[in-house]
Image: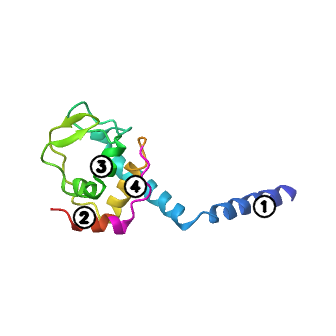
Amino acid sequence: MKLRIIVFIGVLLCVIIASCQSEAEQDFKRYYTGGAIIYKDKCQNCHGAKGEGLSSLIPPLTDTAYLKKNKAELGCFIKYGIKETIVTINGKAFEGAMPANVDLTPIEIAKLLTYVGNSFGNKMGTIAFEEADADLAKCE
């Protein structure tokens, strides 16, 4: 009987602690976790499990300065791919094409950007659906 009470109190405490997270923290965790799944399915094969890229063929996703500077275009790169040489990342220019992912929705792109933007040494916070959707509307 005492063991059941202790287990019940333990479960209750876990629920209370989990419910104390702010909505922003919960959103971040949902976006980040969903983005990790999308990354593994759509991006990891080329960019690597640690975002390291591949020599001079595929750029790494570890250059926080590049990601922050080009934040508004990242969704376009993911959705529509890249056909031209990418500007210098970590002192290297990258040539070659990145395939389009036109099947990804704006919410999936927001999740993917949240994951990439907060992995591999990056700290960009949550990229919300609204932000990704607005950036995608500006793609040329």
Whether label 2 touches label 3, CB < 8 Å:
no
For residue 136, which numbered disc appears in the image? 2
Residue at image mark 1: 9
Residue 51: percent from left, percent from top: 35, 39
Q: Which residues are magenta?
A: 122-131
Q: Is residue 116 left or right of residue 73?
A: right
Residue 46: percent from left, percent from top: 27, 40
For residue 42, which numbered disc appears in the image? 3
Q: In the rendered structure, which disc, 4 or 2, sits on the residue that comes first in sequence?
A: 4
Rendered position, 84 above or below 91: below
Task: Name the image quarter holding residue 112.
Answer: bottom left
Q: CA distance from mark 2 to mark 3?
A: 18 Å
Q: CA distance from mark 4 to mark 2?
A: 15 Å
Whether label 4 touches label 3, CB < 8 Å:
no
Could you classify mark 3 by the number of other residues whose Cα lies within 10 Å: few (under 14), some (14-19), or many (20 or more)? some
For residue 89, which numbered disc appears in the image? none
On whether residue 125 falls in the magenta region, the answer is yes
Q: Secondary structure at mark 4?
A: helix
| Residue at far right of view | 2
Could you classify mark 4 by the number of other residues whose Cα lies within 10 Å: few (under 14), some (14-19), or many (20 or more)? many
Residue at image mark 4: 114
